Image (spheres, rainbow, N blue to C red):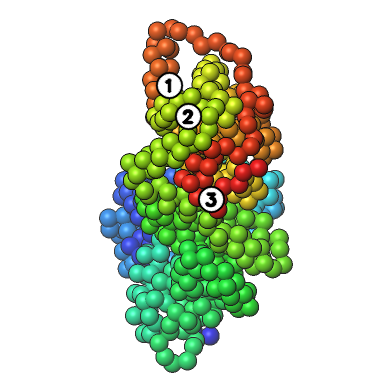
Amino acid sequence: MNYKVLYRKYRPNNFDNIVGQEYIVKTLKNSIKSNKISHAYIFSGPRGTGKTSTAKVFAKTINCLNSVDGNSCDKCSKCLEFNDNPDVIEIDAASNNGVNEIRELKNSITVLPTNSKYKIYIIDEFHMITTEAFNALLKTLEEPPSHVIFIMATTDIQKVPITILSRCQRFDFKKLTVDDIFSYLKKVSKLENIKITDEALKEISYISDGGMRDALSVLDQLNNVENREITLNDVNNLLGNVSTQTINNLAKSLIDNNKNDISNIIKELNNKGTDYKVFIEKLILKLKDEALKYKFDNNNIEIFDKLKNLMFELVNKMDSLKNLSNPYIVIEMILLSYVNLKQEKNNKKEEKSEKKEEKLEKAEKNNKEILKNDSKIEKKELNLGNKVEKSNKIISREIILNRINNCFCNANRQKRDELIKLWHDFISYVEKNNKEILSIIIDSNIVAASNDYAIITVDDEVQSNLLNQKIIKVEKVFKKFSKLEYKFITITNEAFAKEKKQYATNIKNNVKYELKEDLMVENNINNKESDLEKTAIDLFSEDILEIR
């Protein structure tokens, strides 16, 4: 059989041909130039990244008679006869992993090299040696003969005992980049006269997952197609791969909320037998790229949130999908659950896009109408910048200040940070389970928290008042969601800035905060629809606010 597969034919024969491991190559070459060669090395890293090839090149260069700048000359007798050199012994630990094999090795190392400077043992799949064999090897690695060098290669460094690792120089091989693999494949294609498009080479480079051997094997397999240029479709058809165009179409369908297209794409991938892991990995990368386009777009920030959350959910579900006979059923359900952008969010974003002056003017006008129709309110004019009036419809200023005080009493940054993350999940939970309070907590934020109290901020006074009226309801839903019992209070961002400044001044002046009686009780709040709620309906749009 004269034909040699590409990954064997193009195995590196000197340091200059090793791809993507520049730092390791430089270090090994310097050790040869300075004659500072260790007795034991361990090369770890993913498959196909050049561990065994580097070990062989290193072994050849060490015994080379005329090495130049740390590289083998490839002309001397030791270089030319390297593959048949009896002083370079390759051992497959997968099939020679017992104590008896290691004892034979220990006996053989006492024999001097036949015609080389060093006797070199290259042990592949080193992690597969048994525990007893590792123990038998310890003494040899600690005090080896001066003429012996061990080079061990492994894809699972975690299984190698620390007592072994501490006796070796360790080099961690990284996955090759897509660009590195692409450049090398292009070079090999020209040398082999393989007609293939750059698009197809890029795809091979991507799906090989950082392994050059896998990439060359795929190129070798594709070279058997009929005598024509190899295209991206050939790659996808051969490997059951998902095309970049399909991923782009799916991402667009998610952004456009097109359920039918999403379902059709998933069904097509399922029918083709596409590897779901490759599909999810490519989709996650695409979602990241698309999400970043919307990150600083205030008009479409909800798209950023949707794509980001979907990306994280797919990452979390990756491991559990492997236990399913048909993972695409679950994948389709996950994607479809992110299709509908909530109308409440759209309405809220439209409201926020109005100029601040116009919104305040509109709110003030509506509040004046409230005053005309409500004899219980003494003031003739209600300005959004004034303090909250005490009535059975609006939470009293005293209640608000007491809860702010109690939160500041034992304010804790760690609790605040934990609650901020939890609050984001809580809003997502409310979107699906409790639309009654959804419209009033959208765009709210946790800004301070203790073990029992937390302060929520919103942009304007109207939403703050409305949220405080429903605060007991919010507390109950939050407790159901998180199993945590918190007492909340809502103020505007502007008001919190003042409270925060005052808090800093008090702490500086050693003014101590003491817990006060919590005056908030359920009958403080009139659960009937109020004129203020009507104002909020006008501001936030009637179709998203449910009054119960």
Q: Would you identify the image quadrant in which residue 293 lies? A: bottom left
Q: Tell us which disc is closer to us: 3 or 1.
A: 3
Residue 119 image point, x, y percent: 48, 54
Q: Type of residue at label 3?
A: Glu
Residue 509 in sight: yes
- 29 on left or right of 90: left
Q: Which mark is residue 499?
A: 1
Q: Is residue 540 above or below residue 51?
A: above
CA neighbours of label 3 inside 10 A, class few (<14), some (14 to 19), many (20+): some
Q: Earlier in the sequence, mark 2 or mark 1?
A: 2
- Indicate the secondary structure of the residue bearing disc 1: helix
Outermost residue on the left side: it is 69
- Indicate the secondary structure of the residue bearing disc 3: helix
Using the image as rendered, state which of residue 295 and residue 279 is in the foreground.
Answer: 295
Q: Which mark is residue 240?
A: none
Q: Would you identify the image quadrant in which residue 124 lies? A: bottom right
Q: Spatial distance from mark 2 to mark 3, Cα to Cα? A: 23 Å
- Circles 2, 3 touching at the beta carbon (< 8 Å): no
Residue 534 image point, x, y percent: 53, 42
Identify which residue is drawn at 66% across, 48% down.
433
Using the image as rendered, state which of residue 33 and residue 114 is in the foreground.
Answer: 33
Identify which residue is drawn at 27% across, 55% down.
69
Q: Spatial distance from mark 2 to mark 1, Cα to Cα? A: 10 Å
Q: Which mark is residue 542?
A: 3
CA neighbours of label 1 inside 10 A, class few (<14), some (14 to 19), many (20+): some
Q: Earlier in the sequence, mark 2 or mark 3?
A: 2
Identify which residue is drawn at 38% across, 69% down.
182
- Circles 2, 1 touching at the beta carbon (< 8 Å): yes
Per the image, the residue denoted by label 2 is: 491
Identify which residue is drawn at 42% across, 77% down.
200
Using the image as rendered, state which of residue 290 and residue 204 is in the foreground.
Answer: 290
Residue 130 image point, x, y percent: 68, 50
